[in-house]
Image (cartoon, rainbow, N blue to C red):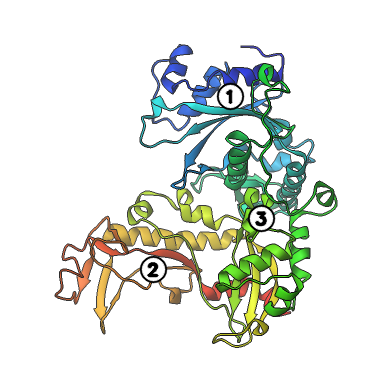
Amino acid sequence: MHYTTKEEVHNRAKDSLGLSMDKIYETSGVYDTNVKNKNYIGDAFELWMGVAKNSRAEADLPEVGVELKATPYKILKNGQYSAKERLVLNIINYMNEANATFETSSFSHKDKLMELAFYHHNTNKPKNLWTFDEAILFSFPEKDLQIIKHDWEIIHQAILDGKAHELSEGMTDYLGACTKGASKKSVKQQPFSPIMAKQRAYCLKAGYMTSILRNYVFGDQQDPAIQKHKFELNTQNGKKEASSHPEQIATAEELATSSLDEIILKRLNSFKGLSVAELKSKLNINVTGTPKQLNSILIARMLNLKGDSANEAEEIQKADIQIKTISLKSNGKIKESMSFPAFKFNEVVNQSFEDSDFYDNLTKRFLFPVFKRLKNQKPSDDEIIFLGAKFWYLPEKDLDVIKGVYDDTSKTLKDGVQLEVRNGRVYNNFVPASANRVSHVRPHTSQTQYVQGKYSNELPTPATWINRPDNDEKFDPSGRYMTTQCFWLNSTYLDEQITDITEL
């Protein structure tokens, strides 16, 4: 199939909507397909578009400069659409990319214009009956492109500095450098260091893809860079009115001279040293509520946002920045470790670290606003001081340490957790905070449960009990259940990450 314009490409993609994968393969004359093939959906899209499988450096359709990508979405319990994963783009060749500019980079050469086909990752439906539900001809909106260019420059500078082995997705906002291939053999040469670096690919982060999905694919927002409707149907009368746009932290004019990080930190740190009482007065905040709610409002107002949470800002959503307020005790130490969502025991056993939700959360970019209490018990607003804020990501070397904690947790679950009662309390043999391995495992709730229930989770292998109480109603004799657990980042580790703020 030959295309002469990008409009023809988009209209052809739109014609695939609603067709099952079976039908697409059948239409293309291919019948011996394997639904377990990880490229099953992507191959179907390329077949429909008349493109043979390839690994070319230029776009899939070089004659019109369009790259083809099929990408999954999921529907959350609240009914919202969400990207299932980051959109992986092209492999980064460290040797070649070192000599490139943004305009001549492999990313710009291959990915500046893409036809994106979205499908629902529906585990309740056979994969061969899945369909493409929407398609857009996508190029980057002007403001996004400025942020992405800055992201590329961060990745490029790491290569020039001989630090490709230290690259992390958390270093950047919209455009990431994700690992491609989980084995130790998946390493590549870099030009300015003898250290072999993990193979990585450019990617658009899941938060960015979710924003595109909600606002442009299944929403009514419009941008000249994004074409949703078929071209011949996209008349002036046929256009929908654009929906309200999320609040924005920065303008395109500001981003032309400063990075997103610089803009955010400049605004937040201009309030450094003020008490919560002074912040409330200066920012005209008259609300009362929990400290968490108040902190959220304070941060939003410091960023010149009208809403009550900076998490609603366009740039925060697209970059999937995790805003984690850190509270220090009067001695300057962090009040508590940082928790991550509870995990299912069977998922840890059956998923590699790199495929886990924990890994996805760890490799995000964090924004730490830091407050210090001048007294520990019930401090007043005058006794809580804003010390400043910083961006942070987990260094690759520490990610390797946490992988060991994850793998040990998986092994403990496979072998059977050891539960021991001492002085009326149940202890287990998961990695504790005292092991000083960056991360540890413990429950998030103070509720304990060793029978099937709200606060417990089924174990893949029965636990081994020592001194199990003689109470079958509270302690299942089968050893099949124990209190649901979470991964945590140690407070002592986090203390070390914010010394540039706390020691000022």
Q: Amino acid at mark 1?
A: Asn
Depth check, mark 3 against mark 2: the one in front is 2
Task: Examine the rendered structure and indicate whether residue 281 appears above or below residue 121.
Answer: below
Residue at image mark 1: 54
Gap between marks 3 and 2 measured at Cα: 29 Å
Q: Amino acid at mark 3?
A: Met
Q: Amino acid at mark 2?
A: Pro
Q: Earlier in the sequence, mark 3 or mark 1?
A: 1
Residue at image mark 2: 443
Q: Horizontal and vertical percent for residue 336? A: 51, 75
Judged from the image, the secondary structure of the residue bearing numbered disc 2 is loop
Q: Horizontal and vertical percent for residue 161? A: 74, 54
Q: Horizontal and vertical percent for residue 84? A: 50, 42
Q: Residues within 10 Å of mark 1 (few under 14, many from 20)?
A: few
Residue at image mark 3: 171
Q: Residue at x 37, y 51 (%)?
A: 347
